[in-house]
Image (cartoon, helix red, strand yellow):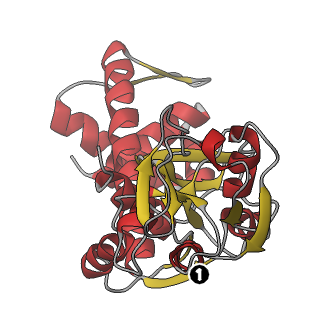
């Protein structure tokens, strides 16, 4: 039994006759009839009941037709998978990432993905999450890795990669504190207005915090705090990485930090390469 015979058999059944099947397949009617006769001879059963007016499937033909359609569907799926694999091997993925990613090791994740798919061209851009989501909207990035805030617009979908936590960052030797309420008179260092961290600070503080120092990175927040210019809410991963010394206070009660996630536009299909990259990041998620 050959695949071309099954395709011809299915065409005769679908078109309801040899003449229309031949026209559909761009073959001579005699060639279609010869393939069906050969298939029937090999199987030892009649697949069609033929009259001068019509061609109908026999019971054996009905049984073969259901199997033939499953075979064709599997073959079509295999072709699609191979096409996607080829696309992944030669694709391109642009990733946006925030500086704070908790315990998720994005450089290692990108390195291992690149080793698995050396033909995929990777590029990375860094920004605050608002800027990266805008880049997703403009089609400038395929994926974003960063905090998934509770007010994330529904046009984005997020898959969790790791948890993050907020701590108080204080200058070395600062007086003991246990909560934000102890810092009403202190100047704060924070990301600029509109950022997620800025919104969290305003929502969590039982007073209106005075923020004379606004900067665009967690690293510079830490540097300004270490220099004694203010206090800050800071992601634990940023507070504990190598850098100038600061005092770190675990908050009681805790102030939640959004989970770190991989995000993309819900309504915009990912390329094969971007889907493979997203799946790779999820496999490396920190439980």
Can the viewer see residue 33?
Answer: no
Query: Where residue 256 appears, x then y in whole percent?
Result: 54, 39
Can the viewer see residue 239?
Answer: yes
Q: In percent of the image, x 32 and y 80: which residue is there?
A: 114
Query: Crowding near pointer 1: few (<14 within 10 Å), some, many (20+)?
Result: some
Tell me which corner region of the image, top left, top right, bottom left or bottom right, holds residue 90. bottom left
Residue under label 1: 125
Image height check: is 50 above or below 211? above
Q: Nearer the viewer, residue 179 or 44?
A: 179
Numbered marks: total: 1
Regarding mark 1 in the picture, which secondary structure is present there? strand
- From the viewer's perspective, tell me whether residue 17 is left or right of residue 113: right
Q: Nearer the viewer, residue 230 or 235?
A: 230
Q: In percent of the image, x 50 and y 65: which residue is there?
A: 100
Query: Where residue 104 appears, x then y in whole percent?
Result: 36, 60
Question: Which quarter of the figure is the C terminus placed in?
Answer: top left
Q: In percent of the image, x 45 and y 38: which residue is there?
A: 10
- From the viewer's perspective, tell me whether residue 225 is left or right of residue 236: right
Image height check: is 99 above or below 251? below
Query: Where residue 37 appears, x then y in whole percent?
Result: 31, 41
């Amino acid at each position: 039994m050959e695949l071309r015979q099954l395709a011809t058999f299915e065409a005769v059944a679908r078109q309801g006759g040899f003449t229309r099947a031949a026209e559909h397949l761009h073959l001579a009617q005699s060639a279609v009839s010869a393939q069906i006769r050969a298939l029937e001879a090999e199987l030892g059963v009649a697949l069609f009941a033929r009259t001068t007016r019509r061609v109908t499937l026999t019971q054996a033909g009905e049984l073969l037709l259901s199997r033939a359609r499953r075979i064709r569907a599997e073959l079509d799926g295999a072709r699609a998978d191979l096409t996607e694999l080829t696309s992944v091997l030669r694709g391109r993925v642009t990733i946006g990432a925030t500086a704070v990613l908790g315990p998720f090791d994005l450089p290692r994740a990108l390195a291992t993905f690149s080793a698995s798919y050396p033909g995929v061209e990777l590029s990375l851009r860094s920004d605050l999450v608002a800027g990266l989501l805008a880049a997703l909207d403009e089609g400038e990035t395929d994926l974003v890795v960063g905090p998934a805030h509770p007010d994330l617009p529904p046009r984005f979908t997020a898959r969790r990669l790791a948890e993050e936590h907020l701590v108080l960052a204080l200058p070395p030797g600062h007086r003991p504190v246990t909560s934000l309420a102890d810092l009403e008179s202190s100047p704060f260092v924070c990301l600029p207005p509109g950022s997620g961290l800025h919104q969290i600070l305003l929502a969590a503080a039982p007073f209106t915090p005075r923020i004379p120092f606004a900067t665009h990175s967690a690293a510079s927040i830490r540097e300004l705090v270490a220099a004694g210019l203010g206090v800050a809410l800071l992601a634990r991963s940023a507070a504990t990485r190598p850098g100038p010394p600061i005092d770190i206070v675990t908050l009681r009660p805790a102030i939640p930090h959004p989970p770190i996630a991989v995000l993309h536009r819900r309504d915009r299909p990912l390329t094969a390469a971007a889907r493979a990259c997203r799946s790779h990041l999820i496999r490396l998620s920190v439980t």
